[in-house]
Image (cartoon, helix red, strand yellow):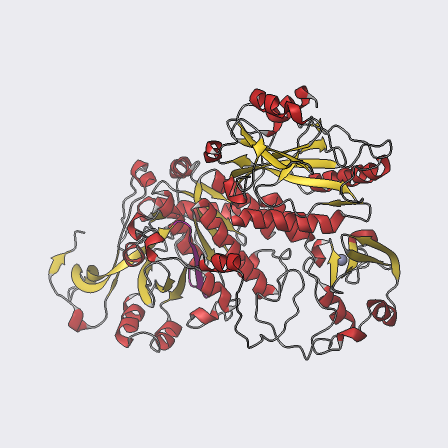
Amino acid sequence: MDYDEIRRWWRVFVHPGALVEVRVISDEFGTESGYFSDIETLLQAIARYDNFNIYYSINEVKSDCSARKQYNQIMRVKRDATSDSDISHRWWLPIDVDAERTSGVSSTDEEKEAAHQLAGKVYTLLRNEGFADPVVCDSSSGYHIMYPIDLDNTPANTETIKKFLSVLSDEVSNDKAHVDKVLFNASRILRMPGTFGRKGRSTDERPHRLAHILTVPDQIVRMGDEPMRRFIQKYQVVMEPPTSQYERREKFNIYDWLRKYNIGIKGEENKGGATFLYLENGCVFDPSHKGKDASIRIDNATGAIGYKCFHNSCAGKRWRDVRLLFEPNAYDREWKLPKGQQERAGIDDPKPQKAEVPIVADEDEKTKLRKRFKPLSSIEKLDISQMPKVKSGFREIDRLTGGLLMSEVTVLSGTSASGKSTWLNTLALNVVNQGVKVVMVNIEQTERMLKNWIQMVAAGDSHVIPEERKFADDEIRYRITEETGHIIDEWLEGKFYLYADDESTKWDDLLASLCVMAEDNVRFFILDNLMSLDMSSIVGDKWEQQKQVISMLQKFAKKYACHCMIVAHPRKPQGFIRKYDISGSSDITNLADNIFIMHRANRDFYISGQTFYPKDEIERYYKSLPKGNVMEIVKNRTYGVQDRLVPFIYSTKSRRFESASWGVVDELVKDETGKNKLMKVQGFRAQHFTYDCELKMSSIPDAPMNSFRGDGAADMQTSEEDYPF
Ligand SMILES: [Zn+2]
């Protein structure tokens, strides 16, 4: 063995302070293992094993394992080798490229060259897909491409790596070399660079070779799961039965089918257990997608068929779509699958559930299943009041919901003119004012327009001035002074960001950008709106795509402990919107943690609202809140609040929304002599608030009177006062 190369391996691969397992595997002595936290001790311990195959644990072993008896020495072990649960962290994503050959022997030079070719292909492919630079090792019979990652050892991450290796292998493996699909579990071991591959006898043709490091990037950049997830999304192929379940499958032959529709085959390739057919005229959906961009894939074992075209416009196209293109009625008789099941990768061959109760006999399986149930004592107590949250800044909403919880997703809906986007502008600043960083993605508005609106809201009624210019509709428009604008810019610096115009509206791109901002401590994300996102990279129809977006946002919110608020337009443009009017399937509303619907207190609201809410409540909003809006809390997961209406008053001057409370308000009326008088009446009063930035602004007189008079003389209280001017 080569001690210096082993030292180099230690420097490159072992995370500082981490515990490593070394395993020696031989036919004669079985498995021997040792834990080390120091390279020189390790070298001494393995010195006598030069004639054996020596492996190391790729990922960091929990320090507790150093209490096992094999610490600092290598010894025979039966049970206490490292298991998946002994791994504390994943630092490397291992891609093992190996030549196809008889098991238990070293590769020939020719076989190894096939692995070399494939390793090069993997390296280039993943670099083009945005992966960080890997460390590449000669593994003696093949190659190890090791990508630096930084992931916790969680079942979700294991699942991502498993899926990634499988999709990668299916994509690149050929009959001479393959990418190992099974290296996903956390406690995997690989041959240690600096030691020899000792498989079989060393012959001239199949020599034992020294494993060693080939290249180390100048800088090790660790990746999260995002590049893998993107790769899966792009390269995953949905394999499905060739026919609908009502057709007789054995009669279906893909070659006959292609002939029938005059689709010529240009090339055929066998890789990763599947047959790839490349078509003479390129992609069936767009003939400009040529070469190997599009292919039909047949799973050699099951006969399942997939279609893959890498062009964006073909994202999500699968075998079924190909068939429908030529045979529009092919699936007419098909039994409709429940949503969500349709998209599942791999073969989904729907069979009606057999009416049998399963019997579990295997003891290990029983133990596993039993663990799915927990006694309450083992579950940590939930203290809602202690959960991280941010206030909406609207008193009544906060009183009812306790605030917006970090790690949750809120869906906001309402008709097109209900004031959703405007309300969000105020909300964004309410959140900023609490010292929480906010990102706003508004795909339909330009950044300059949004800046203008946000600045008006930030200034408030007291700091906006009327435009001198007259407008056609005779309405007075307001603006802010340059000085006020500077104060607002300064206040928002580093706390509030808009997604730039012309940036990609592709969901994958956007989500990646949001993750980066979350890493920079942004904790509140506003997305306006769901329907304007480009979701073409997500497999499935529009409803399925929207559902996936919400579900991914939820994972995002949990991962980064942030709150996401996303606007979903309703299916109908007008009327009194209910939960089931929110676009997409009911999945969206089921998934969302909170659902708010914004209503305009207009005639639609007055008429339809009465079928769901008490007439007097609806009437009060309609009559006393003439320019107001009502927010309906439809769902609130944490406190179970539902079916509550919260009134808002909108200021046309500053475009600010404020909660409205019912009570005594001032109203200016003329008395019999034509003199102005201030009367006390029942009505809605805006609950004013002041942003920190306002304290720095020089006040402009003519302060607002955001209140609306209540209806009916009976309500009126008549304590009069002279109006001061
Ligand atoms: Zn295509």
Q: Quadrant of residue 435?
A: top left
Q: From the viewer's perspective, is residue 406 above or below residue 38? A: below
Residue drawn at 52 percent across, 38 percent down:
89
Question: Quadrant for ligand 1?
Answer: bottom right
- Furthest toward the front, the residue is 28
79 horizontally vs 456: left or right? right
Q: Quadrant of residue 25?
A: top right
Residue drawn at 32 percent across, 40 percent down:
692
Q: Is residue 415 magenta?
A: yes
List x then y, in percent, for residue 146.
66, 36
540 horizontally vs 585: left or right? right
**Magenta span covers which residues?**
406-419
Q: Does the magenta stretch include residue 694?
A: no
Residue drawn at 76 percent across, 55 percent down:
273
List x then y, in percent, for residue 709.
24, 64
Residue drawn at 17 percent across, 70 percent down:
715
Q: Is residue 466 visible?
A: no
Q: Can residue 723 be seen in this view?
A: yes
List x then y, in percent, for residue 643.
34, 68
